[in-house]
Image (spheres, rainbow, N blue to C red):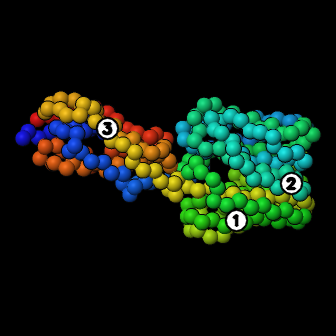
Amino acid sequence: MTQNRCVQQRGARKFGVLQAGAVIALLLLGRAAARAQQPALVQQATATYHLSSTVTVTLASAPRFGDALVLFSANDSVVIQSAAGGGVDWAHQVSSGSHSVCAIWWGFNSSSSGSSVTVTYVDGTGSGGVNVSEFSGLAPIAPDNINSSQGVSATPFVSVGTRTPNDLILAAAADQSVNPTTGGPTNSFTALTEAADTNKIIPAYRIASVAGSYNTSWTEGIGGWDAVVVALQASTSYGVSLSSLSLSPSSVTAGTALTGTVTLSGLAQGGDASVTLVSSNTSAAQVPPTVTVPSGSTSNSGNDRCGL
């Protein structure tokens, strides 16, 4: 029987076979984590507002398709009513408001439509600052854990427990002192950009190395503070499976073009998904060892002409 050999062209994986039944596709490890990465900060921006019910933060560029946005907010007395923009659905939140209203909101799977995020508060009697940060590599599911704390001291602190490694731990304090932070964040947290007007938002993050308890603190002027923390799961904790492999046409002869499409059960998150291809009859058909589904996509397809 004449043998067909597939080649790679223009960056897409294509394959050709004599009979559709000769090809089987298996998702590597049964999940989209074959080349997944840890969550990573992509960009951030800040804004302040004074006695206003709205504030708009504009990122340097529109978020990448499939990334997540996180909003850190401090207000001296008023809670957030809504957040909009950035191509995400702002559906989740954690907040504390004993002294200042400190809040973290987040939204997943950006459609990459627009670089501005508008925050609306319930009224215009408050002032403060906000930070909007873009992160890659997050699973679009409920958080692993949330927590809050409050006090009157020079050391705002917060802690949270995680159940899975590689969680993105997001922490923030809202402080009545607008002077620059003099210490922290501690315990390997990375400081994000602060913003202040009457109240100051002090955001930070770190990647969990193992499941367990994590905490951080800052050194501030003595005063009332509120702090919140959330652990969001990495995409490596959120698997997708192979949904289908389709071939068109279902059979071909040597030298004839054939299109194959690999489809996953959800978006490849946090990195490209690698799908293993094997042929059940290598004397009739040879296929590439893997097909790559790009991050933020559910499928990859292409056609090629298989030579004699």
**Can you give x and y, in whole percent of width and height, for residue 188 in the image?**
65, 65
Crowd class of label 2 (few under 14; some 14 to 19; many from 20; radius 10 Å): many
**Which residue matches tag 3?**
246
Q: Amino acid at mark 2?
A: Gly
Report x, y in % for residue 131.
Answer: 73, 45
- Label 3 packing within 10 angstroms: few (<14), some (14-19), many (20+): some
In the image, which disc is placed on residue 97? Answer: 2
Q: Residue at x 60, y 31 (%)?
A: 113
Q: Which mark is residue 160?
A: 1
Q: Position of residue 235 (x, y in %)?
A: 52, 53
- How far, Cα to Cα, is label 1 from label 2? 18 Å
Which residue is at 67% across, 61% downward? 145
Q: Is residue 83 visible?
A: yes
Most extreme residue toward the bottom is 212
Quadrant of the drawing holding the N terminus:
top left
Residue 198 is left or right of residue 263, and the answer is: right
Q: Give how far apart the Cα atoms at labels 2 and 3 are.
A: 54 Å
Amino acid type for the residue under numbered disc 3? Ser
